């Protein structure tokens, strides 16, 4: 599945997970044109707040705001409304909050001039079947992800966050038009660190993923732009 360069860029999201504002903005500017979105998560958001989201957005790359909202529906609806007004292209909530909470998030985000895609986070890629069993969650990762993804679609979410391991099954079950966003993307030979359910960029794409979230293999590389270019080349290779 060879892609054009433009299509490969659109599939790539880079996770700007850090606390240093200047470094986050430097990376965002450096990667504009090399990534379809950049992810601002909890670490960056708790350090610098909504202003950082606006600043990154002004650099010309869409923002994936990864806050994983999880609270009672009323609170999540209001938080989603506030987050959507920051201009993010995508916003995450936890699927484990239930269908009413997911519907509330979708309703809150819909009030923005350009509503973000609300994505339900299913099972974190740092967890595997053994970890889920330890939490008292039966059925393993694949079964839990499938159930929560179906609930998210019924609630009106634009997609889900899942590991690459579940992407093929979800794509077959849910069809096209429902975003599958996959963290846990590691180029061949890269360290897995705290991720357990991982795949290479090409494998995730071929499994049906729409957005490939890559963090440290790019941001911690000596040359982040070159690391991003290497991933784009992998996606474009025949």
Image (tube, rainbow, N blue to C red):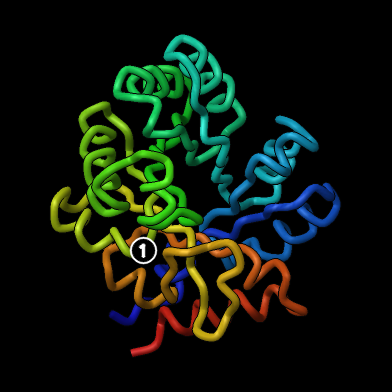
The x and y percentages for residue 26 are: 79, 59
The x and y percentages for residue 195 are: 53, 63
The x and y percentages for residue 161 are: 40, 48
Question: On the rendered structure, is 177 left or right of 201?
Answer: left
Rendered position, 49 above or below 237: above
Q: Nearer the viewer, residue 218 or 121?
A: 121
Q: What residue is pinned by disc 1? A: 164
Question: On the rendered structure, is 202 left or right of 185?
Answer: left
* Neighbourhood count class around disc 1 (C-alpha, 10 Å): few under 14, some 14–19, many 20 upward: many
- Which residue does the image show at 32% across and 52% down from the upper left? 141
The x and y percentages for residue 144 are: 28, 44
Q: Nearer the viewer, residue 175 or 124?
A: 124
- Image quarter where the N terminus lies is bottom left
Numbered disc total: 1
- Which residue does the image show at 59% across and 53% down from the upper left? 38
- Which residue does the image show at 28% across and 34% down from the upper left? 152
Q: In terms of image quadrants, where is residue 156? A: top left
Q: Nearer the viewer, residue 80 or 110?
A: 80
Under tag 1, what secondary structure? helix
View extreme (top): residue: 74
Rendered position, 66 above or below 96: below
């Amino acid at each position: 599945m060879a892609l054009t360069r433009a299509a490969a860029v659109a599939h790539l999201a880079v996770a700007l997970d850090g606390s240093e504002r200047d470094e986050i903005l430097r990376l965002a500017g450096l990667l504009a044109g090399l990534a379809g979105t950049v992810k601002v998560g909890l670490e960056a958001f708790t350090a610098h707040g909504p202003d950082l989201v606006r600043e990154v957005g002004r650099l010309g790359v869409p923002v994936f705001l990864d806050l994983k909202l999880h609270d009672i529906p009323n609170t999540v609806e209001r938080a989603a409304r506030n987050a959507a007004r920051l201009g993010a292209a995508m916003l995450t909530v936890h699927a484990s909050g239930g269908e009413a909470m997911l519907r509330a998030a979708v309703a809150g985000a819909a009030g923005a001039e350009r509503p973000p895609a609300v994505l339900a986070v299913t099972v974190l890629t740092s967890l595997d079947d053994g970890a889920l069993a330890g939490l008292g969650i039966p059925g393993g990762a694949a079964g839990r992800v499938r159930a929560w993804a179906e609930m998210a679609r019924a609630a009106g979410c634009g997609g889900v966050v899942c590991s690459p391991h579940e992407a093929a099954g979800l794509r077959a079950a849910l069809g096209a038009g429902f975003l599958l966003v996959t963290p846990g993307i590691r180029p061949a030979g890269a360290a897995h660190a705290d991720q357990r359910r991982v795949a290479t960029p090409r494998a995730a794409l071929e499994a049906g993923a729409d957005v490939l979230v890559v963090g440290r293999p790019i941001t911690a590389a000596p040359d982040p732009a070159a690391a991003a270019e290497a991933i784009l080349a992998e996606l474009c290779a025949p």
